[in-house]
Amino acid sequence: MELKDITYEVDNGLATITINREKRMNAFRAETVDELVKSFKRAWADPEVGVVCLTGAGDRAFCAGGDQKERAETGSYGKSESGLFEILALQRVIRDIPKPVIAAVNGLAIGGGHVLHVLCDISIAADHARFGQNGPRVGSFDAGWGTGLLARIVGEKRAREIWFMCRQYDAATAERWGLVNAVVPAAQLKAEVRKWADEMLVMSPTTLRFLKQSLNTDTEHFVATGSLASTGLINFGDTPEAKEGVVAFAEKRAPAFGNYRNRVSV
């Protein structure tokens, strides 16, 4: 499988999938998402793999979400194999793969990148990592697992704060809120992931599969919510309000959303 935007390697039962777009803060375009879906399925089908790690290249970002620069330049996230932006398929495969998935958060986990780490079974963060949402700033949202599952993890009040304020939170705060399992010095992140993976690799793989599927059951209804939100986002993305967010991001200025409050005041 030829890969352009990610790298894939397997070492002693641990498959590491790395978003390799460091110059774009490991933000994903449609092609990146296609490659991620294929790589997770590859790890799923490989009997040599018992644990999967998702991370980003370099030490600045785990993933900065959707590539807003690409969106500003082309009006979309680029071409994909199917002609669709398969972000829901990526979220689905992270949930469905019957093997534990560790997010190695090596820097910024923002927007859609934040949602990806939330979806992983375990998150281990470098001490310089930062977390947060960005959708309301750029005319976007993730009203499925990105909201509902987040609220299950950190609580309703915290989830609303994260989404409504678009603040960034340091790794210590993320650990205190239960958003990550552990925080380690950046130089030790890879070794810590290896340690956690090795502890799980000695467990019964069938038992882990049942446990993951059982734990997923309580939040499966967010699939339908996410599909509904995706439909809304497609339509909202064509409005002047959403386009203002994209243009403001490209121009590195604050968006002027004040004129659109009448839309929510009826």
Image: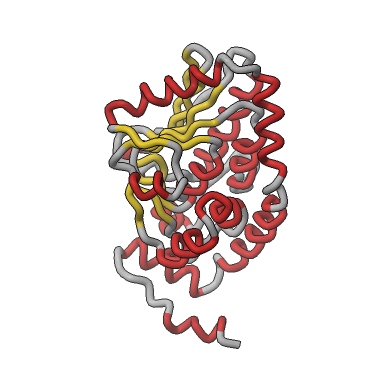
Q: Position of residue 224 (x, y in %)?
A: 72, 54
Q: Which quadrant: the C terminus?
A: bottom right
> Relative to the observer, which residue lies in front, 242 or 210?
210
The residue positioned 27% from the left and 27% from the top of the image is 187
> Relative to the observer, which residue lies in front, 50 or 64?
50
Query: Can residue 160 be spotted in the picture?
Result: yes
Q: Is residue 142 above or below residue 24?
A: below
The residue positioned 59% from the left and 48% from the top of the image is 85
Determine the image quadrant of residue 86: top right
> Relative to the observer, which residue lies in front, 200 or 68?
200
Q: Is residue 200 above or below residue 264?
A: above
The residue positioned 36% from the left and 67% from the top of the image is 248
Q: Position of residue 60 (x, y in %)?
A: 30, 40
Q: Which quadrant: the N terminus?
A: top right
Q: Is residue 43 above or below residue 173?
A: above
The residue positioned 49% from the left and 74% from the top of the image is 241
Q: Position of residue 236 (x, y in %)?
A: 58, 68
Q: Is residue 30 above or below residue 262?
A: above
Q: Position of residue 122 (x, y in %)?
A: 51, 35
Determine the image quadrant of residue 234: bottom right
Q: Residue furthest front?
A: 176
> Relative to the observer, which residue lies in front, 106 or 232?
106
Query: Can residue 19 be spotted in the picture?
Result: no
Left or right of 256 on screen, residue 50? right
